Amino acid sequence: MGVSASWRCEAPAMLVSAEVRQACEDDQGVVLRVRRSSSPLTHEAHIGSGVQLGIDLLRPDDWVGLSVASADPASEMLLGVLAGQRAAEDLRALLKAEHECPPAPRELAIEPGDVEVWQRVAAVDGLDRWLQLSLDQSLVDAERGISRARAAMSLPTRSAARDVVVGEALRLARRAAAGVVVYLRELGCRPVSAQLEAALDRLVDGYATLAAEVAGADRQLASVVTAWRVARDRLSSGQVGLPAATTAAARGTGRPYGYEALGDKVLRASLIDPRQLPARVVALAREPGVPEVSVSGAGPGLVRVRVSAGRRALDRWVEQRLMVRLLDRRVAESHSHGLLTIAEPSHDGVGYFEGTLPLLGADLDNLRVDVYDPLSDLPPAATDADEGLWEARRAVAFLAGWRSLVARAQVWPETAAPARDLAALAVQLLSAGGVERPAFPGGPTAAELRSPASVAAQQLFGKLVDDEPGDEQGATAGAGRLLVAELAAADAMGEVGSD
């Protein structure tokens, strides 16, 4: 049972509301939740010790949610950093006091300090969750670890909170190390942009910082530092060359991550719901209205479902939980369920998830196919016309298109064509039903993107190559600055321009 409470703060920009819940029948303590209006591109990142920080990727310099499952020394310290010491003290008093159920309403004052390093942790995790671009997953995981390492350095040494955050940073950085080393070794064979070189230098510096936190030598962390030293020496000496095979492979990372046609065998297709799975598990189409799931005959009474795999290094739990179901579009009635499994890459190098399901009398012409995670908090959409589904698809299309545009403008400013790319993005978002209607809650309108002369477009253009935080939608500076993996993907495109 819960009660509403208000949070107040001297800073007007931080006026928020909150829900305070007291666990009355078990030992779960107090949970605090803060909510403000936000876009579909929100994510709650686990900071440590049950503390979750929510962020909206369109406005990453203002967090939109904070929850604390219980109070211990680590979570209290993290809460003090994120919401201010007064809020942490009120929480401690609330836990220690005797209460009836439900507890009395409370007012907690939020007075956060410098929390950009923590917002960066949440933003990187959020981009890992929502950004549908062809990214090197090892670089993404490495930055998830290093962002935590830098945030941990702001905490007192020998504190429980610092130990918790550093521990998670080490786990992520070590897991990514082998892939980062492979990337750096290949990088030493071709020229790179100054922006990417600086970003990699900062990333590897984070590995060195983490290594200093470990007692004794750490081979995984050290391997990244060594590989970068060798690659940077080659870059500095000018002993680089880009073989044709490497060029093709690098430019191949910009391959459209959309629908792969199966020729005459395709009988039906459906839309993927990006709210169901992390980004890059399956290959989402660039265009919000382009379906990704294909269905073909697999024998009497059977159909084969296929969807292109993304570029994410899959954890075993993802592979074991990728489900598919057949629905009757007319009545949203489920006919059969099955498990999708990863198939061997085809001759064109494209990987697939596949599954064979019985039709059980379903009418093939009215068949909808859902690919989903059965443990998702959100049930899969019943129809392709579901408004929430379309809002989510337009949101991820905007996020990918906008950040890819900005990355190219920063890495290859002499060949970037932001006006053209922004106009193309507007065409994608016109499926929202009009040029004046926001493509999704909190997002821009197609008219704002389509007209370079508009105030909104000028605001979007204004910060393309700037490194200062701004208020524009889809901020790519401050806590939301480009990932190393985004710069790497844009760098690999060379002078190809728009992919």
Image: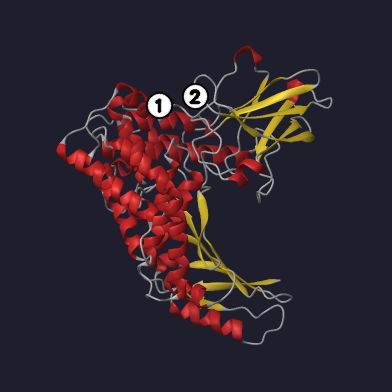
Q: Is residue 202 above or below residue 361?
A: below
Question: Which of pointers 1 and 2 lies earlier in the amino acid sequence?
Answer: 1
Q: Residue furthest bottom?
A: 98
Relative horizontal placement of residue 27, taking residue 470 as reference (left or right): right
Q: Are marks 1 and 2 in contact (CB under 8 Å)?
A: yes
Residue drawn at the location 41% of the way across and 71% of the way down: 112
Q: Secondary structure at mark 1?
A: helix
The numbered dot on residue 349 is: 2
Residue 248 appears in the picture as rendered: yes
Residue drawn where x is 38% and y is 44% of the image: 180
Tell me the tag on residue 252.
1
Q: Callout 1, which amino acid?
A: Gly
The one of 196 and 40 positioned closer to us in this rendering: 196
- Dot 2: element: loop
Nearer the viewer's eye, disc 1 or disc 2?
A: 2
Q: Locate residue 123, reporting x and y percent.
A: 43, 53
Q: Gap between marks 1 and 2, in whole Å?
A: 10 Å
Specify few, some or many for label 1: CA neighbours under 10 Å numbering under 14, 14-19, or 20 or more.
some
